[in-house]
Image: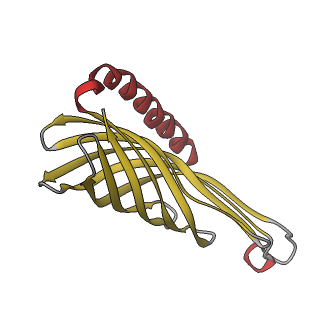
């Protein structure tokens, strides 16, 4: 299955690069950039952990109620004396919105290519003979989110968002973000 994940991850990444090139000329009227920081809880086949998460994305409004958004996210990057776990990668999503005078309520559906790396010094998880147990895989995950962009001014917004990720090998993640969106 890993051999299928790598070409799909490259396809998602290349699609995002192509979309950013295409939308860069159109961004003057309907584009935006967003940066988020939050809290992520990631559960993998090997272990689970929680830590600070962050993401950055570019978006484009192609219809009065629809956006396309692509970016890069780090769900978790935790390291302690017993283990280290990292999961990050690109994503592409479609957002539907409902506007009000205060801001925009939106839902997000998409796909992400998440690189999961896990190393543990715990011998019970790896067997009696092992001193270090490692897990490294690229997982294609679906994502679903709900959020609100609150207007600060004509071009700036504060974003509050919850996103769920789910993929193969019992991978799941729950992310709560606070961010800043700038419309160009």
Residue 10 lies, with reference to residue 45, above or below; the image says above
Residue at the front extreme of this rendering: 153
Residue found 51% across the figure and 54% down from its top: 54
Residue 146 % position (x, y): 28, 61
Residue 111 % position (x, y): 38, 48
Q: In which quarter of the image is residue 45?
A: bottom right
Image quadrant in which the C terminus is located: top left
Residue 47 % position (x, y): 62, 72
Residue found 31% across the figure and 19% down from its top: 25
In the image, 152 versus 171, the foreground residue is 152
Residue 110 lies, with reference to residue 162, above or below; the image says above
Residue found 26% across the figure and 56% down from its top: 150
How is the model colour-coded? Answer: secondary structure
Q: Quadrant of residue 22?
A: top left
Residue at the top extreme of this rendering: 25
Residue 20 % position (x, y): 39, 28
Direction from residue 78 to residue 89 in the image, left or right: left
Direction from residue 127 to residue 55 in the image, left or right: left
In the image, 121 versus 40, the foreground residue is 40
Q: How many labels does the image show?
A: 0
Residue found 61% across the figure and 52% down from its top: 137
In the image, 180 versus 40, the foreground residue is 180
Residue at the bottom extreme of this rendering: 124
Q: Quadrant of residue 126?
A: bottom right
């Amino acid at each position: 299955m890993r051999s299928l994940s790598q070409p799909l991850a490259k396809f998602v990444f290349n699609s995002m690069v192509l979309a950013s090139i295409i939308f860069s000329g159109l961004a003057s009227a309907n584009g935006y950039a967003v940066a988020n920081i939050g809290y992520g809880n990631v559960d993998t086949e090997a272990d689970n952990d929680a830590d600070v998460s962050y993401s950055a994305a570019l978006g484009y409004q192609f219809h009065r109620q629809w956006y396309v958004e692509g970016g890069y996210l780090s769900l978790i990057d935790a390291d302690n004396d017993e283990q280290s776990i990292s999961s990050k990668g690109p994503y592409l999503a479609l957002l539907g919105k409902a506007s009000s005078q205060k801001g925009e309520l939106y839902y997000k559906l998409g796909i992400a290519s998440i690189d999961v790396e896990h190393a543990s010094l715990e011998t019970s998880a790896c067997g009696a003979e092992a001193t270090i147990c490692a897990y490294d895989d690229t997982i294609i995950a679906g994502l679903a989110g709900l959020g609100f962009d609150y207007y600060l001014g004509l071009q700036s917004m504060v974003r509050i968002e919850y996103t769920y990720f789910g993929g193969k090998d019992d991978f799941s993640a729950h992310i709560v973000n606070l961010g800043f969106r700038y419309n160009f």
